Each structure stands twice: as C-alpha cells, then as structure tokens.
Amino acid sequence: MNNPEGFLNQNIVKDIAQHNVNITSNMASINVTVKRKSECVNGEDIEDEEENEKTKRQRTSQEDHKTIDENEEEVENDNMETDEDVHSDTEDAVIFEIQEEFKTEFGLVTNLFQRKDGSMLACDNSEAHLLKCYRLENGQLRTIQEIKDIKVFDIEEIGYSEIIMSFVGESVIKRLTCEGAFEEIIDVSPFLIRAVHFTSSRNLLISVREKGDVLPLRTISQRKLLVMDSDGNHIHEYEHDENGERLFTVIGRVATKHDAIYVTDYTSYDMDGSVMSLRYPNKVEWRYTGSSQPRSNFRPCDILVTEDHRIVISDRDNNLIHILKPDSSVLSLIDTMSVGIRWPYSLAIDHSGLMWIGCSEIKDLIRKKIFEAKLYIVKCSCV
C-alpha cells in the first residue's frame, strides 16, 4: 500500500483521538413516544460498483428508492398518524420528536457526517452524485459548500479542518483541501475502498474488496477490514474468524466504541444483511439480524455508536431505527413512519445531541427524475 503524502502529518495526528462528538444521553427509556412538529421548514448501499447488469431489476414504480445496487418498490405503511404514542411493555418512554424538516436536492442521502466546526456534510453517491456542506442557522439549512459530479462513499475527519473521503469504485483515500480540491493520501490498489473510520486509539479502519462484481461471493473474493496506524502502516486485518471462515460478504459501514468494532454486512443486492460486533484479533462477539417485528427483511443502511455506547441502526425498508445495547439486546425499536419519516437511511448526531436522519425520495414525472429526499433533525432521548 502506497502512502505518498505520509498519510497523517504530525500537526494533525494529535487531533485524531478527539474526533468523537460528545453526546448527551438519557438511556433509561424503552417505550417510544413519538411526536411530529406541526410546522416544518422546507429547505451500493453497494452503490453501482462495477455491478453485473443482469442482477439489476428495472424500476417498477414512479416513486422508488435506491438499495444496494438497485431500486426497490415503495413499502406501503398504513401507520401515518401524527402525535401518537407507540408503546412497548414497560412504563418509561423514549421521546422521538422532529425538530426540523428540510427538502434537499438529493435522491438519497447516502451519508451524513458531523464536522468539528458544527457543519454537516451530506452526500448522494447513487442518484444526484452530489456533496454538500450545510450549516444550521436559525432554523434554516444554509449550504456553505457544494461539489457536483462526485460519488463519495464515506467521510472522516482527521483534524479540525482535515476531511478525508473514500469514493465509489476507487482504490484511494483523498483529503479535501480548503480550496475544494482533492489530494490522494492512501492507495490500497488493487483493492477498492468502501468504509473509512477512525478509532479512539488513532487507528484507521478501511473496508476493502477486490475489483469486479460485488456479488455473488466467490472463492477468490477478498473482503477485508484493514487496520492502519496514524503513520499509514498496516498493523492488522480482519478477514476470517477463529475457524478460518469468511467474516464478511460486503461491508457497508463501520463504527467503534472502545475495543468493539461494529460493521454492517450485506449478503444481497437488496441490502439484506446483519450488524456484527468484532473484537481483536478475529472474534465475532455477536451478529444482529433484526427484530422479529419488521415487515421486511432486515436491511441495515447506517450505524453509529453514542457516547453512552448505544448502537443506532437505520433500517430503511422497515422504516425503523434499531437501538441496541452493547450485548446486542434491543433497547428500543422506533417506527419512524409514526412521525412521517419515510425511508430513513443515513444517520449522524450533532454537537447538541440531536439526531440527523437522511432519507430517500425520487419522483419520476414523465421520465424526469426529481430529487427531493428529506433531511430531518430529531430529538431522541434514547441517544
């Protein structure tokens, strides 16, 4: 693996350990009380990575959403009431309340990333091929930077203003400069890079796969999670478990807390999959395949871990947010359709402890795609 830029210079290495955002938490709740704000402000996924065209289905409705490499028909949900309570078997309640709602120019908000300066990066690598940097000011979502014709897969922040990104179908990680240009810093050829994530111990996790078709998995397929130190040196890789069995099919997103590594792993083009908990050197602590309540297969789109070690997973096709404890037991299942949030995909938590949820929305009016995916800011007492 090449490291033409020395990966991390000494001035920003010291900032890596500070990349986690402090999150205010209230974790005593299990029941869900959902509310919708009366007035709103308008404002791969295994995405197209050299996929086999024979495995893709044609769009069958005018209002569809993107999955791993293809479109899925809209799942109807008859629970569209607002200001209603969704109860479980305990007495406490989890508050889930929309604070702001915005309409974007994305077809699918595939990634959200909270920067240290308070701005939010959002991208769409499957439809609009767009990257935007937003700042929330007085209830308005202001665009402070925009880059078009770009397919960003994942985003991380090294220092206060050092953003690195991976791209769909590429083998390099690039640094975004202040001028909006990109500089290559890591090359893992011949592999393709997917997720990138910094740990609190200053290591960089990079998920990679071999070039070629994403699925089906073959004996020669290489699906790995690489571990590199702050100087760009390879120090470990996850590929097989203690019994020599393959760990991953296709890694989607990666999150960490302390020594635990959590990944979303997909087994189909529809994004059917699971969430895995890994421990060094190659131990699988548990694999979560969803709750018995969902109406569709479990399709984890994004994952984050809160300061209080709650694991938050978006499940778009079921219109659910799964919140797990570190042992994989379910703390809460939040039905986002109860407040009118449809197809939740990407997740982030801002500096004030509010959850941002990026969704998907495409309208085809006389064969002209209209991108207007929603972006929500939600108060959730469970995170």
Image: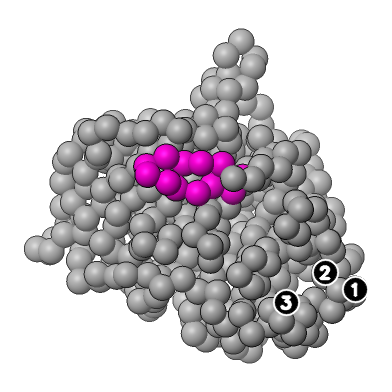
| Badge 2 amino acid | Ile
Q: Which circle, 2 or 3, is nearer the viewer?
A: 2
Crowdedness near tag 1: few (<14), some (14–19) or many (≥20) residues, C-alpha within 10 Å = few
Q: What distance separates the C-alpha of mark 1 from that of mark 3? A: 18 Å
Regarding mark 1 in the picture, which secondary structure is present there? loop
Horizontal side of residue 17 vs 304, given as left or right: right
Q: Which residue, given by chain and number where applicable, does mark 3 sit on? A: 226
Q: Is residue 316 above or below residue 42?
A: below
Q: Quadrant of the C terminus?
A: bottom left
Horizontal side of residue 283 vs 186, given as left or right: left
Residue 74 screen position, x and y as percent: 47, 31
Regarding mark 2 in the picture, which secondary structure is present there? strand
Taking the magenta stretch, the answer to whether it contains residue 136 is yes
Q: What predominant SS class does the magenta segment belong to?
A: strand
Instruction: Name the residue located 36 percent from the left edge and 57 percent from the top edge.
Output: 354
Q: Is residue 105 above or below residue 282?
A: above
| Badge 3 amino acid | Leu
Look at the image and tell me whether residue 325 can be seen: yes
Residue 275 screen position, x and y as percent: 50, 66
Q: Nearer the viewer, residue 358 or 174?
A: 174
Q: Which mark is residue 185?
A: 2
Discs 1, 2 touching: Cβ within 8 Å: yes
Q: Which residue, given by chain and number where applicable, does mark 1 sit on? A: 4
Residue 95 screen position, x and y as percent: 22, 55
Q: Which mark is residue 183?
A: none
